[in-house]
Image: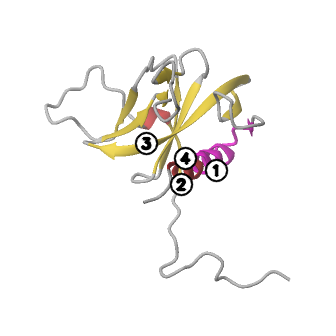
Amino acid sequence: MEHPKAIGDRSTLAIMIALQAAEIPFFLPFGENSRCDLVIDYRGQLGRVQCKTGRLRDGAVRFRACSSYAHHPNPKVLRRDYLADVDYFGVYCRETGGVYLVPIGVAQLRREGALRTAPTRNEQRRNIRWAEPFEIGFVTATPRPGAKPGAGGSCA
């Protein structure tokens, strides 16, 4: 099973690739304990971005909109939302290859966010947060069959 940090790092990298391709400048905060992963210069405004991994479930890209502290010894809180700490969620979904930039003002999320990619089973159209308006790009990375890390030659 892949380590959650590796999954998150891949999502952050995909989001940075999509931002660069969309010509949205971004900056990296220094250190690991920041509440945001990136700062973007979007439409003349600086914005804090929290990068998240989305997973395609039931026709929607779903992502966590909070941090979990359950793995810490004696946490004061188990979950903490990002409402006062970030301006956007940057979301990468490996299944769709989509990268989404979701303003936190559009989605006052505390636990989980969802971006719909397929119609609902009951054909509901009102109050649906569609993924398309938030797409900033697509990123796909497919490993070469049989590729092994470090087997690709040498550096002189």
Q: Which mark is residue 8?
A: 4
| N-term mark: 1 or 4 | 4
Labels 2 and 3 touching (C-beta < 8 A): no
Circle 4: element type: helix
Q: Nearer the viewer, mark 1 or mark 4?
A: 4
**Quick one: label 2 or label 4, which is nearer the N terminus?**
4
Q: Nearer the viewer, mark 2 or mark 3?
A: 3
Tell me the CA gap for discs 2 and 1: 7 Å
Q: Secondary structure at mark 3?
A: strand
Q: Is residue 12 magenta?
A: yes
Question: Residue, x 58% and y 50% (percent of image)?
Answer: 14
Determine the image quadrant of residue 147. Answer: bottom right
**In the current view of this chain or complex, which residue is farthest to the right?**
156
- Mark toward the viewer: 2 or 4: 4
On the image, the x and y values in percent for residue 68 come to 48, 30
The residue carrying mark 2 is 139
